[in-house]
């Protein structure tokens, strides 16, 4: 007996969902974020966002960007004090090695958040969507902390 | 047993040297000693209350001088947060010290914005602003430098600047230099020694 066309369609749809589902999960699912926080500065000054990441997979993963409904702009940056000069530059990505970890931390890689709307104050929880090189995304809740937090 | 005469002499000289050293004992700094290598602190700027001030107004206080700007996204906040923790660890002693945050961004930093900014970090921090030529003169005096980077396209820009922290004694003399990566323990140690120097009994 031939399977009914509707059953075929259901099987196909299920298969497609499984394949697509694994693609959607991707790097975002093998990466865990913790200690996520934002250093809040007075006025509309840009704020740095920081977090610790671990990558449970057997391949390196790259964090490539960030966005948040709470901020007009979010960019991946890296600051340094090499040669005794403090400076900052935009970067394309931060690598998280296979079975390893990496950090967004003050004075190094960080997400720069600009044009908060409404203003973010210490104690707020802000969701930031992080993007990875395979096109997957991850929503991480960052806690807003005072300017002088370390 | 009789010691050779030369040895006795050497021993005597060593003792004399030790005694001599002891008399003008220098504090044993953990940070970079710059005593005698930089001119005494001198400036005429405006503080974050809009009041004209000179270096002489801070005589009697130990000073931590740091160049930066309020739009400085990450390095300045990190350094100021670290200085705040260092001050906290000194307890009441820290009242004899001031953090002088000198703006290298005269175009954007006003006394008002500096006021909100420095107070978000530490109550003993003072923001100093002034015309480019006065800031440049102070930076030059301290062998420091800053460069305004090209516009990022949206009218915003960064300023690259020396990240050193200069510690001055109560007489406005440069004593030690710290980098932002200096350990907090070393900062606390040297700042505490500096506060003890010439403290009123
Ligand atoms: Cu940045």
Image: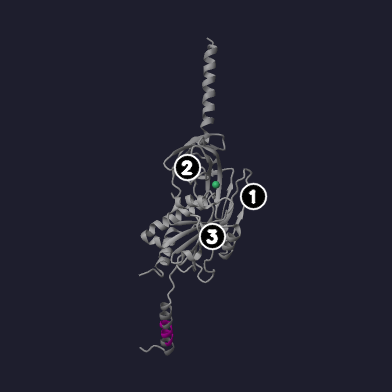
- Circle 2 sits in a helix, a strand or a loop, which is it? strand
Q: Which residue is mark 3?
A: B45
Q: Report the residue marked by disc 2.
A: A54
> Residue under circle 1?
B150
Tell me the colour scheme of the image. Answer: one colour
> Closer to the observer: label 3 or label 1?
3
Residues at marks 2 and 3, CA–CA distance in whole angstroms: 48 Å
In the image, residue B45 above or below residue A53: below
For the record, the magenta segment spans: B9-15
Say whether residue B13 is magenta.
Answer: yes
Label 2 to label 1, Cα distance in Å?
36 Å
Q: Residue at x 53, y 11 (%)?
A: A4
Residue in the foreground of this view, choosing between B131 and B89 = B131
Instruction: Name the residue located 41 percent from the left edge and 63 percent from the top edge.
Output: B96
Chain of residue at mark 3: B
Of callouts 3 and 1, the N-terminal one: 3
- Give neighbour class at mark 2: few <14, some 14-19, many 20+ (Cα, 10 Å): some
Q: Is residue A87 above or below residue B199?
A: above
């Amino acid at each position: 007996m031939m399977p009914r066309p509707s059953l075929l369609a259901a099987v196909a749809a299920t298969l497609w969902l499984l394949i697509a589902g694994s693609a959607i999960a991707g790097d975002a699912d093998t990466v865990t974020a913790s200690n996520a926080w934002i250093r809040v500065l007075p006025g509309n000054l840009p704020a740095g966002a920081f977090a610790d990441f671990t990558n449970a997979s057997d391949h390196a993963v790259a964090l490539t960007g960030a966005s948040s409904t709470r901020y007009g702009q979010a960019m991946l940056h890296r600051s340094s004090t090499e040669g005794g000069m403090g400076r900052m530059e935009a970067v394309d990505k931060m690598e998280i090695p296979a079975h390893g970890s990496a950090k967004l931390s003050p004075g190094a890689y960080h997400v720069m958040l600009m044009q908060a709307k409404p203003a973010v104050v210490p104690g707020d929880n802000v969701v930031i969507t992080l993007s990875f090189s395979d096109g997957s995304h991850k929503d991480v809740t960052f806690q807003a902390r005072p300017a002088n937090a370390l | 047993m009789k010691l050779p005469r030369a040895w006795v002499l050497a021993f005597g000289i060593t003792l004399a040297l030790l005694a001599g050293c002891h008399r003008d004992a220098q504090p044993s700094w953990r940070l970079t000693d710059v005593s005698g290598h930089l001119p005494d602190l001198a400036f005429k700027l405006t503080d974050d209350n809009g009041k004209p001030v000179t270096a002489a107004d801070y005589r009697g206080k130990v000073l931590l001088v740091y160049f930066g700007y309020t739009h400085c996204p990450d390095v300045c906040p990190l350094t100021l947060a670290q200085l705040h923790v260092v001050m906290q660890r000194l307890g009441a002693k820290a009242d004899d010290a001031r953090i002088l945050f000198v703006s290298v961004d005269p175009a954007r930093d006003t006394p008002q914005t500096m006021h909100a900014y420095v107070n978000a970090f530490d109550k003993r921090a003072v923001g100093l602003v002034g015309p480019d030529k006065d800031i440049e003169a102070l930076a030059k005096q301290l062998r420091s430098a800053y460069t305004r980077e090209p516009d990022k396209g949206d009218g915003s820009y960064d300023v690259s600047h020396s990240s050193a922290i200069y510690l001055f004694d109560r007489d406005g003399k440069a004593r030690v230099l710290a980098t932002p990566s200096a350990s907090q323990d070393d900062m606390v140690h040297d700042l505490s020694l500096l506060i003890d120097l010439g403290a009123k009994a």
